[in-house]
Image: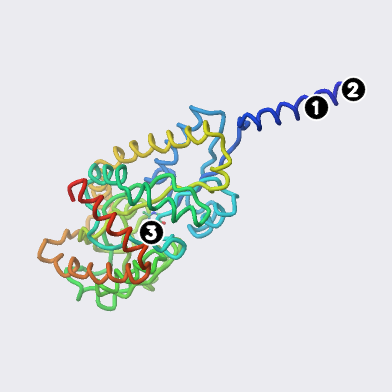
Amino acid sequence: MTNLKRILTGTAAAAALMASAGIAGAETWRYAFEEAITDVQGVFATKFKEEVEANSDHTIQLFPYGTLGESADTMEQTQAGILQFVDQSPGFTGSLIPEAQVFFVPYLLPQDTEKLGEFFRTSKAINEMFPKFYADQGLELLTMFPEGEVCMSTKEPVHSPEDLNEVKVRVMTNPLLVENYKAFGATPTPLPWGEVYGGLQTGIIQGQENPMFWIESAKMYEVTDVITCIGHNNFTTAVMANKDFYDGLPEEDQQVIQGAIDTAFDHIIGYQKGLHQESLEKILEDKPSMEVNVLSKEERAPFVAAAEQVEDKFIEMTGDSGKELLEQFKADLEAVGE
Ligand code: 6CS
């Protein structure tokens, strides 16, 4: 046997041994998300990367928004196994996983980040029921986490559903979110993220909704004049892995991933303390003329009343599985005092 042959045979034998022992070599795993590296999803992803790299030989390569296309593109790439990890909001997962639209029944979620953290940590609906829906689409659901109270930003003030009459409000591409804004009196316009700034600038749309950090960092305030908070939702997102990739990992690697997810989750809950207010202050510093309205209980009442018809639509769209999920979701919220 030549030296080269001996080395090659040795390497193959070692690889076979490692494979049979379930030990994978150092790998680079690709992780895409829908925001910039300094935004909430980016801060989560950075913490996840640090944890995985500190506790294994693997490397995580991060792909912020725009580097691999829109949310729909990165989801396809994950399902195809080109990406190992993806962060995608249920706002874009509506057609793929209709049950994930439960996050768009208005006035279900609390706004307090700590309470939300407890809900996401303990919820049976999220931790036991949702993973099955994602698994059916070839995805391992690793976690879901909140990103902050959603507020509208529009060209004109909004104090009632009448003020939204004929206002084209951009929503994420999610059928229930469309129903949500119809019930609020607006003309919902589903669009991928990349078309929102230009759409507002040219007047094709006249409003959109997002958490305050995103209204600030994505400069939504440059192309709208009024921010209105009615407390109807808190932006939720989900981190997933390609299921075949995840299932094929040795248990040791799966544990590293779960540990990194748990650490990043705690980190992102803490990170968001005060973020809404800080972002609002930055907006007002840059554009003092921005009008900010937090609607009173009385003003919110018709929006709260509209939630019922959105809930009915959710059940119409998802049938028994959605109904069961919604009931569990409500029970889980009650368990954390909501
Ligand atoms: O509205 C959107 O489409 C975007 N909003 C946030 C907070 N994150 C990513 C998403 O694409």
Residue depicted at 56% across the width and 32% down the height = 58
Q: Residues within 10 Å of mark 1 (few under 14, many from 20)?
A: few
Q: Which residue is mark 1?
A: 9
Measured from the top left, where is residue 157 in percent x and y?
20, 68
Type of amino acid at the residue the image marks with label 1: Thr
Q: Which residue is mark 3?
A: 100
Measured from the top left, where is residue 279 in percent x and y?
28, 48
**Marked residue nearer the N-terminal end (1 or 3):** 1
Q: Which residue is mark 2?
A: 1
**Marked residue nearer the N-terminal end (2 or 1):** 2
Give the color scheme: rainbow, by chain, secondary structure or one colour. rainbow
Image position of 304 with respect to 67: above or below: below
Q: CA distance from mark 2 to mark 3?
A: 59 Å
Image position of 300 with respect to 9: above or below: below
Measured from the top left, where is residue 42 in percent x and y?
42, 44
Q: CA distance from mark 2 to mark 1?
A: 10 Å
Find ligand 1 in the image and state its quadrant.
bottom left
Image position of 7 with respect to 243: above or below: above
Type of amino acid at the residue the image marks with label 2: Met
From the viewer's perspective, is 19 left or right of 191? right
Q: Secondary structure at mark 2?
A: loop
Q: Report whether the residue tagged 1 is closer than 8 Å to ligand 1.
A: no
Q: Are marks 2 and 1 in contact (CB under 8 Å)?
A: yes
Q: Nearer the viewer, residue 160 or 58?
A: 58
Of all residues, the one furthest to the right in this rendering is: 1
Type of amino acid at the residue the image marks with label 3: Ala
Measured from the top left, where is residue 184 in percent x and y?
24, 71
From the viewer's perspective, is 12 left or right of 254? right
Q: How many marks?
A: 3
Q: Secondary structure at mark 1?
A: helix
Q: CA distance from mark 1 to mark 3?
A: 50 Å
